Amino acid sequence: NYDFTRKLSGGLYLRYMENKYDEYWPLLNGQTYSTNLRFSYSFNARLYSILRTGLTRENTINPTYSYWQPSIGIGFGSELPYGFHVYLEPSFYTSKYDEAQWVVKDNNFSQITERDFVQRYALSISNNQFDVWGFVPTFTISYVKRSSNIWQREFQKTTLEFTMQQRF
């Protein structure tokens, strides 16, 4: 992380993973490369925004499952009275696969190169007054919708998450 000014900070994150699926499906073995940028801007002592962007590359033995995945998200957070904190973040990413795969479409087998678009909307709520050994419980409700040119890959879901976050 780097503080550009008193209100603006940012960071560059790089990740490499070696993926091995020994017993299940070695066609998915390969590497994942990720580059992510994160910028945080404080409007004042109570209101801030976070911009996230990234690019992921998944290489697999079978190029049908290799893809590029650009992503972006922008969130807004605020400290509220009585110790409450809220954060809202819509985020989006698209997956573009390298080669076609066989799928059933219109009651026939055909080859289609998969293209997905995912949108996620998340709202997190916590309260600093509920401190448990330095950790604050956080509830997040999120809605995810995945659209695809392969109908079997499409879905919508709503989730409720409970996490404990350390406050500094």
Image (tube, rainbow, N blue to C red):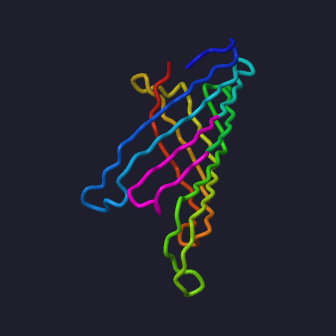
Residue at 64% from the left image edge and 20% from the top image edge: 9
- In magenta, the rendered stretch is 52-70
Residue at the farthest bottom position = 107
Would you identify the image quadrant in which residue 54 lies? Answer: top right
State the image coordinates of residue 168 (x, y, percent, origin top left): 50, 18
Residue at the farthest top position = 6
Would you identify the image quadrant in which residue 79 lies? Answer: top right
Residue at 65% from the left image edge and 42% from the top image edge: 72
Residue at 53% from the left image edge and 44% from the top image edge: 56
- Check the picture and name the quadrant holding the N terminus: top right
Q: How many marks?
A: 0
Per the picture, the main secondary structure of the magenta-coloured stretch is: strand
State the image coordinates of residue 37 (x, y, percent, origin top left): 60, 31
Is residue 66 found inside the magenta-colored segment of the image?
yes
Is residue 46 found inside the magenta-colored segment of the image?
no
**Position above or below: 123 against 118:** above
Residue at the farthest left position = 23
Residue 20 is left or right of residue 113, and the answer is left
State the image coordinates of residue 53 (x, y, percent, origin top left): 63, 37
State the image coordinates of residue 155 (x, y, percent, origin top left): 57, 65
Would you identify the image quadrant in which residue 15 lies? Answer: top left
Q: Nearer the viewer, residue 14 or 143?
A: 14
Residue at the farthest right position = 43
**Position above or below: 100 against 55:** below
Q: Nearer the viewer, residue 127 or 156?
A: 156
